[in-house]
Image (cartoon, rainbow, N blue to C red):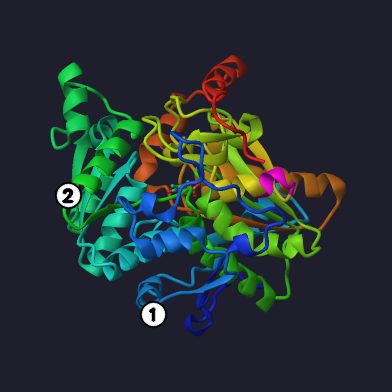
Amino acid sequence: MEKKVFLSEKDMPRAWYNIQADLPHPLPPPLNPATGEPITPDMLEAIFPMNLIEQEMSLSRSIPIPDEVLEQLLLWRPTPMYRATALEKRLGTPARIYYKNEGVSPAGSHKPNTSVAQAYYNKEAGIKRLTTETGAGQWGSALAFACNRFGLEIKVYMVRVSFDQKPYRRMMMETWGGTCVPSPSPDTSAGRGFLEADPDHSGSLGIAISEAIEDAVTSENTKYSLGSVLNHVLLHQSVIGLEARKQLESIGEYPDIIIGCAGGGSNFAGIAFPFIRDKIHGKDIRVIASEPTSCPTLTRGHYVYDFGDTAKTTPLLPMYSIGHGFIPAPIHAGGLRYHGMAPLVSRVFTDGLIEAKAYNQLETFAAGIAFARTEGFIPAPETNHAIACAIEEAKRAKEEGKERVILMNFSGHGIIDLPSYDAYLSGKLQDHVMPDEEIEKLLKELDEYPKPK
Ligand SMILES: *Cc1c(COP(=O)(O)O)cnc(C)c1O
């Protein structure tokens, strides 16, 4: 038995997998909130280049990865797959646990899988500069890395409180040549409005999105870029599952259970969708999305048309949501604090192709510590949600005496999130469970809009 399974560079997938071609029920279209009508591609052109809009709407099963993108992905891909032998031993489980290590990318997470593709397509479309928002900085740093590879300028609007408290990812962005400012900033009219009301405004993701979009719409040769939720982002992440399938095949394995943590849904979709294709065609597997109890989008949200952002600037998206007005509790898994779930992940959830489970913050850190003390790698706080779920399933396999194969996505390492481990180890972390009344109240605001079918 080997600890790691590598894939050679020549076996790197040459095309992305688009689950839209295999869905039992097609994706409902995004709607224009003013008219209730489906949006047309040209309405997105102010913020995205047409080549990415085409990908967003494509129904082709397989979309070739351009050579220039492949060349960048090959910097760290194919990523290694590990068998979690030490964790299995600690748990005394008959299950075999495999994890795909996406923490080996330059930015330390799965996010560069899409940022390099997005930077490439923008460059192809003649764009010179990208804007985006970032919370804790994972997406901002991944996009700064990608813009460096393709010679694009980048400006990242980073939520002020994170900018002040979590400087290391800003330093990464600047090291790769990007510009990062605290949001609200004096650089946009949206930002100036918030600063006038409160010069010490701590910011929010919603405000940062408004600033990044305003900048893109009002600047020359500039577009906006998003790190999760959208169909083209999930498409780019499919390399994770495509590689994992080949790696398992090479050692004669096939998973019984596939697990990923889910914020906007991109890394979960990345590992899961190529296997969900098999499930649609009859394979008997379980696929589980793991989320925080403080942001229980799939486990307690509703399938609605909702805005992608707090400021209601986006089209209405058909998704599981707890409401765009959601203000997240300050949990450390910053990447999992999004109010909605990717339309494609929401769709397969309504069709019963995936399950969802929510975990409390303390349980996820206990899982992360168990992982670090057995497998060695220190996981990102987001990744700890997938590990908590994998541990639960490995224990169940033990109770039932079943030799199950569990595949999990290790979405990123936690070296830049070490203060969160410090807080956990010194007893300063708490659980934040979202009350039902709050979800009902937030969703009530959406009553005036249609419901997706
Ligand atoms: C951003 C992030 C996530 C959550 O985003 P998804 O789009 O749901 O994948 C999970 N893990 C890590 C390490 C992240 O950086």
The amino acid beneath tag 2 is Ser
Q: Is residue 65 visible?
A: yes
Residue 122 vertical placement versus 386 (above, below) = below
- Of the 4 image quadrants, the one containing the N terminus is bottom right
Q: What segment carries the magenta color?
A: 348-352
Residue under label 1, please give it. 67
Q: Position of residue 272 (x, y in %)?
A: 62, 57
Front residue of this view, candidates 300 and 222:
222
Q: Are marks 1 and 2 in contact (CB under 8 Å)?
A: no
User: How far apart in space, not on screen, are marks 1 and 2 (Cα)?
Assistant: 30 Å
- Label for residue 185? none
Residue visible at 51% across and 57% down in the picture: 234
Question: Would you name the residue on which mark 2 appears?
Answer: 219
The mark tally for this picture is 2
Q: Nearer the viewer, residue 182 or 314?
A: 314
| Residue type marked 1 | Asp
The answer to whether residue 95 is left or right of residue 344 is: right
The label nearer to you, 1 versus 2, is: 2
Magenta segment includes 60: no
First in residue order: circle 1 vs circle 2: 1
**Toward the viewer: 18 or 221?**
221
Residue 167 in view (yes/no): no
Where residue 224 appears, x then y in whole percent? Answer: 30, 51
Question: Which quadrant is home to the C terminus?
Answer: top right
As drawn, is 437 to the left or to the right of 134?
A: right
Mark 2: secondary structure: loop
